[in-house]
Amino acid sequence: MIDPKHEVSITRQAELVGISRAAVYYVPRSISEADLGLQRRIDALHLEHPFAGSRLLKKLLRREGIEVGRKHVATLMRRMGIEALYRKKNTSKRHPEHVIYPYLLRHVAIERPNQVWALDITYIPMRRGFVYFCAVMDWASRRILGLRLSNTLTADFCVEALEEAIARHGAPEIVNTDQGSQFTGLEFIDALKGREIVISMDGKGCWRDNVFIERFWKTLKYEEVYLRAYDTVSEARASIARYIEFYNARRPHSSLEDRTPDEAYFGMQKLKAAA
């Protein structure tokens, strides 16, 4: 993006692309093994206690013999893209182009496939490093319709997961997400509006608004991720894809009367077609 040999000065090039001149010379430092191990433990604790902020997590870690400061825990949480889930005052100004949409699903009966899809992102630890995982879930059947892994928290891999699901299954009536910047930015919103999909967003910190996919993260991590130590992103992608195939096609789901998500999703479609 920045060409040191170009006739336009580096300072001017940085201004044109909207970054600071110092960022041009920044070389990212690798993450230490200690921090990677700490992130894995924070991820597990966050899964068990989603209400825990950096202060409580610091205390829980210290009870396990891990000496760490609150600020360092907060830094790692930001890197992982997680935060304590509770209602709090809105004390920050949103980007003027990032419109927040209301939550539309309260008291709505969700009874058919492709009525409501949910998208969310979670942190996936590897042996040396980590990635972020975006999944698309059909609410009525709990079926996972699309997925993508990325090493950055940008919007593009969420858009790709959405478009993969739409290409395979058609567009849903409603898509529900949280208020993360990946889902409030123009790239993701335009992908929905261009297909006339209704947009719904969780209340700030209200994890229960998207409880089904939150439960899926716990299932995925305990039945797949925490049992592995992925060496590469490609290995993580292949292994998680195999688990999703098992989850969709073979794993009975108690809330679906012990049917699999595949049986629920395609069974509902057959009933709809017959009706």
Image (spheres, rainbow, N blue to C red):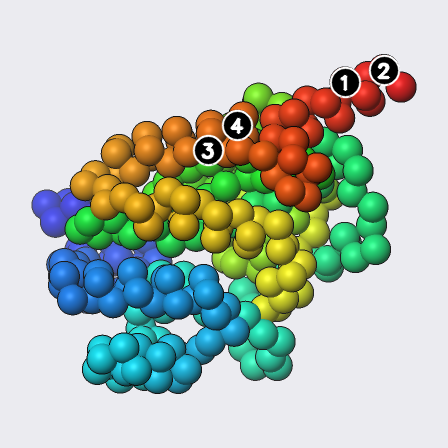
Which residue is label 2 attached to?
274
Report the residue at 58% width, 34% height from top.
252
Inter-mark Cα distance, 3 to 2: 29 Å
Which residue is label 4 attached to?
250
Quarter of the C terminus within the rendering: top right
- Which residue sits furthest right? 275
Report the residue at 79% width, 38% height from top.
111
Report the residue at 27% width, 44% height from top.
228
Q: Are marks 4 and 1 in contact (CB under 8 Å)?
A: no
| Residue type at numbered disc 1 | Lys
- Tell me which numbered mark, 3 or 4, is placed earlier along the sequence: 3
Q: Nearer the viewer, mark 2 or mark 4?
A: 4
Which residue is label 3 attached to?
244
Which is more toward the observer, 216 or 54? 216
Residue 270 disc label = 1
Q: Position of residue 264 (x, y in %)?
A: 68, 29
Q: In which image quadrant can residue 229 be found?
A: top left
Inter-mark Cα distance, 4 to 1: 19 Å
Identify the element where label 2 is drawn: helix
- Tell me which numbered mark, 3 or 2, is placed earlier along the sequence: 3
